[in-house]
Amino acid sequence: MTELFAGPWGPILIFGLRIVDVTLATMRMLLVMRNQRAIVPFIGFFEAAIWVLAVGTAIQNLHSIWHILGYAGGFASGNLVGLWVEGKLAMGLASVRVISRNAGEDVANALRHEGFGVTEFSGYGREGRVELLLTLVKRRQINRVVATVEAEDPDAFISVEEPRTIRRGWLFSTRRK
């Protein structure tokens, strides 16, 4: 195996290993932030094993600029791939806050028509009366929520945040004994 990594395919193999390693690291960190304790250790195991292989091979071939470039390029590409994979998986939930001066009730009704739960509040902003709308959605639904809000009120203020802890609510309703 040493000959394979030391040869002309070595930099390409190191590049590929680093992409996998850094992608796993990105996913592991995001899952840690989401408190997904069951899968994180397994991802960490494979991440570490791949990293040791890639870094060990790169260090053994420090005389080759191609091996170093393969290592560094794989790291950079792994960051991009990790973020792309996470975006495609869109795990977790998002809290969407909408502040509307003119169409709060219409926005709330449109969101409810789309199947989202919405909580409405009346309030006062810098320029007078506003409606504050709160909804909790799956991250992959954010674009649909934003499009629905903007269709009803193109001037609405929209902010999206990732909640840390969630308990109960219509999205998590369970049968009561």
Image (cartoon, helix red, strand yellow):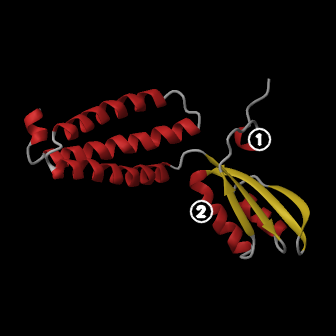
Q: Name the residue under label 2.
A: 143
Q: Name the spot of residue 78 as percent of width and height, x first.
A: 35, 49
**Looking at this view, is 142 or 73 the one in front?**
73
**Looking at this view, is 90 or 59 the one in front?**
59
Task: Give the quadrant of the C terminus.
Answer: top right
Whether residue 114 is visible, yes or no, is no
Number of marks drawn: 2
Q: Name the spot of residue 176 as percent of width and height, x first.
A: 79, 28
Q: Distance between the residues labelled 2 and 1?
A: 22 Å
The amino acid type found where label 1 is placed reads Gly
Q: Name the spot of residue 19 as percent of width and height, x first.
A: 32, 47
Q: Is residue 7 above or below residue 109?
A: above
Residue at the (82%, 72%) spot, across then down: 103
Task: Give the quadrant of the N terminus.
Answer: top left
User: In the shown orientation, is residue 22 left or right of residue 153?
Assistant: left
Q: Mark 1 points at which residue?
A: 169
Helix, strand or loop under label 2:
helix
